Amino acid sequence: QSVLTQPPSVSGAPGQRVTISCTGSSSNIGAGYIVHWYQQLPGTAPKLLIYANNNRPSGVPDRFSGSKSGTSASLAITGLQAEDEADYYCQSYDRSLSGPYVFGTGTKVTVL
Amino acid sequence: EVQLVQSGAEVKKPGESLKISCKGSGYSFTNYWIGWVRQKPGKGLEWMGIIYPGDSDTRYSPSFQGQVTISADKSISTAYLQWSSLKASDTAMYYCAKWGGELGPVDYWGQGTLVTVSS
């Protein structure tokens, strides 16, 4: 049972903006630990999308952005495209017995 | 180019043992943590454990402590995940992953090893 909670699914039309939340607690995100985001396309290994809250690796479009506040983090996708249809996971460090590394529950993004 | 190449798919019976591998290349294998991540069919990612090949410091998720063993052979830049007695519930895709730093992120992933446990 993950300590980082995400909505199971979000959807949007091409060109729209969608956001995915990642809700943690005082033992992980709320303790100041950085958050990372991964994209997993169908049938493939996950890929790093956002690191250290709001940084994009080389090659990741600027349509993807991350933010963090309090005990939560968010991933935003602006100008949604068909190829963005995938599963998205947040990940952070946790100092409770659940950790130290934890993934979010995952969110399926559907492009309508 | 950093690469993590995992061993091939396995089909095993309950009670059998198994060791899968992950060979790193294109970076200093001993200086970065390597972890293992489980993904059951249709489910999310679960962190299992991590090892620092330089000194073999190993940490396990409480959910996997005692269920699996993580090891590494730095002479051949290879990390391992092993089971002494598989269960049907171990059926999953297993990814090895290179941590970019102690707090992450995972900057490189292996292609995955599918383990199927069935009688």
Image (tube, coloured by chain):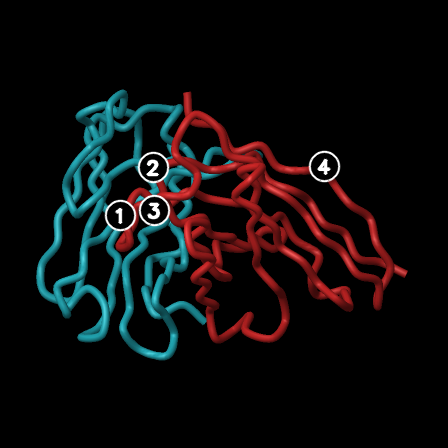
Q: Which numbered tag is attached to residue A48?
A: 2
Badge 4: chain ID: B
Instruction: Name the residue beneath numbered marker 1.
Output: A36
Q: Earlier in the sequence, mark 2 or mark 1?
A: 1
Q: Which numbered tag is attached to residue A10?
A: 3
Q: Secondary structure at mark 3?
A: strand
Task: Estimate how packed mark 1 is, as few (under 14), some (14 to 19) or many (20 or more) residues with alpha carbons within 10 Å.
Answer: many
Task: Estimate how packed mark 2 is, as few (under 14), some (14 to 19) or many (20 or more) residues with alpha carbons within 10 Å.
Answer: many
Observer-side mark, 3 or 1, equals 1
Q: Dividing the image into 4 quarters, which one contains the C terminus of chain B?
A: bottom right
Marks 3 and 1 share the same chain: yes
Q: Are marks 1 and 4 in contact (CB under 8 Å)?
A: no
Name the colour assigned to chain B in the rendering. red
Marks 1/4: CA distance? Answer: 28 Å
Marks 3/2: CA distance? Answer: 20 Å
Marks 2/1: CA distance? Answer: 8 Å
Q: Are marks 3 and 2 in contact (CB under 8 Å)?
A: no
Relative vertical location of residue B2 with respect to residue A5 in this rendering, above or below: above
The amino acid type found where label 2 is placed reads Leu
Q: What's the residue at 17%, 25% (across, down)? A: A62
The amino acid type found where label 3 is placed reads Val
Q: Earlier in the sequence, mark 3 or mark 1?
A: 3
Instruction: Name the residue beneath numbered marker 4.
Output: B8
The amino acid type found where label 4 is placed reads Gly
For the colour cyan, the matching chain is: A
Horizontal and vertical percent position of residue A85: 41, 33
